[in-house]
Image: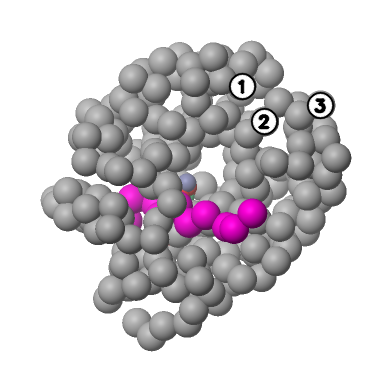
């Protein structure tokens, strides 16, 4: 399948979010990546339900919600109600991961699990068939605009090998430091959802930056 681009609104302009959501609506973006941080699981706080509801009211594309929060089970229903289409929880934040994934599916959302850079893909061996998506963190979660970690390529290969024959339609999502220089190699290695925050929103032309990621083009600025 063609790769999907999911720009992260973490680096959008929160004083005028409407403008950036409308830009994403017009762009080649497939999903909108929504990073929720609680200041406990990660050393940063982003935003919660009120903002997500506002985004949902404007967005013409699915909301790809990435929960960097402890005990996500407490809030799954609220994230669904706020407008999440995909809900990804962190492996490291879930005590009963199987239960959490079933709950997300019962809510009618795509269910994903995110792995921190230090968590091996092998941890998903007993749940891989149940997942719609696996999000491989290619930076340590918490902040945008960090340097891409090269160990990500091996993890994509490990995940592809694990999913082969067991879950061939699995979405393999990469999050952190994705830009024009690494996207093609990531896709060739097996990634099919690419999150990009800084490389889109710090560009002088974010719309064009999204097209460049979608079509493997290089652009200046
Ligand atoms: C990091 C977030 C990412 C972040 C990616 O914790 O999960 O989604 O917004 O941003 P860039 O593309 O700037 O690394
Ligand atoms: Zn994210």
Few, some or many residues within 10 Å of mark 3 (<14, 14–19, 20+): few
Q: Residue at x 85, y 40 (%)?
A: 165
Gap in Å between the C-alphas at discs 1 and 3? 13 Å
**Label for residue 126?**
3
Q: Position of residue 142 (x, y in %)?
A: 45, 47
**Label for residue 217?**
none
**Label for residue 131?**
2
Residue sitting nearer the eye, 39 or 165: 165
Few, some or many residues within 10 Å of mark 1 (<14, 14–19, 20+): many
Q: Of label 1 and label 3, which has the lower sequence position? A: 1
Quadrant of residue 170 in the image? Answer: top right
Horizontal side of residue 99 vs 109, given as left or right: right
Gap in Å between the C-alphas at discs 2 and 1? 7 Å
Q: Position of residue 16 (x, y in %)?
A: 14, 52
Where does the C terminus fall, quadrant-wise? bottom left
The magenta-colored residue range is 1-11
Few, some or many residues within 10 Å of mark 2 (<14, 14–19, 20+): many
Label 3 sits on a secondary structure element that is loop
Label 1 sits on a secondary structure element that is helix
Looking at the image, residue 87 lies above or below residue 189: above
Q: Is residue 37 visible?
A: no
Gap in Å between the C-alphas at discs 2 and 3? 11 Å
Residue sitting nearer the eye, 14 or 31: 31
Q: Residue at x 28, y 73 (%)?
A: 205
Label 2 sits on a secondary structure element that is loop
Instruction: Check the image and name the residue furthest to the front.
Output: 1
Q: Are marks 2 and 1 in contact (CB under 8 Å)?
A: yes
Residue 2 highlighted magenta (yes or no): yes
Q: Which residue is mark 1?
A: 101
């Amino acid at each position: 399948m063609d790769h999907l681009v999911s720009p992260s609104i973490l680096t959008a302009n929160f004083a005028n979010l409407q403008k950036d959501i409308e830009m994403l609506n017009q762009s080649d973006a497939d999903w909108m990546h929504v990073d929720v941080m609680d200041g406990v699981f990660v050393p940063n706080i982003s935003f919660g339900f009120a903002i997500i509801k506002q985004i949902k009211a404007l967005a013409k594309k699915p909301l790809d919600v990435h929960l960097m929060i402890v005990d996500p089970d407490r809030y799954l229903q609220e994230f669904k109600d706020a407008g999440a289409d995909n809900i990804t929880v962190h492996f490291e934040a879930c005590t009963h991961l199987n239960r959490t994934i079933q709950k997300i599916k019962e809510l009618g959302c795509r269910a994903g699990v995110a792995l921190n850079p230090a968590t091996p893909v092998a941890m998903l061996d007993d749940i891989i068939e149940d997942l719609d998506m696996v999000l491989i963190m290619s930076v340590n979660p918490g902040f945008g605009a960090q340097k891409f970690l090269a160990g990500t390529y091996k993890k994509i290969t490990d995940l592809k090998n694990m999913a082969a024959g067991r879950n061939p339609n699995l979405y393999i999502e990469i999050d952190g430091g994705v830009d024009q220089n690494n996207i093609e190699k990531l896709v060739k290695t097996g990634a099919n959802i690419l999150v990009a925050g800084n490389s889109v929103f710090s560009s002088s032309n974010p719309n064009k930056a999204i097209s460049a990621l979608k079509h493997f083009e290089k652009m200046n600025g």
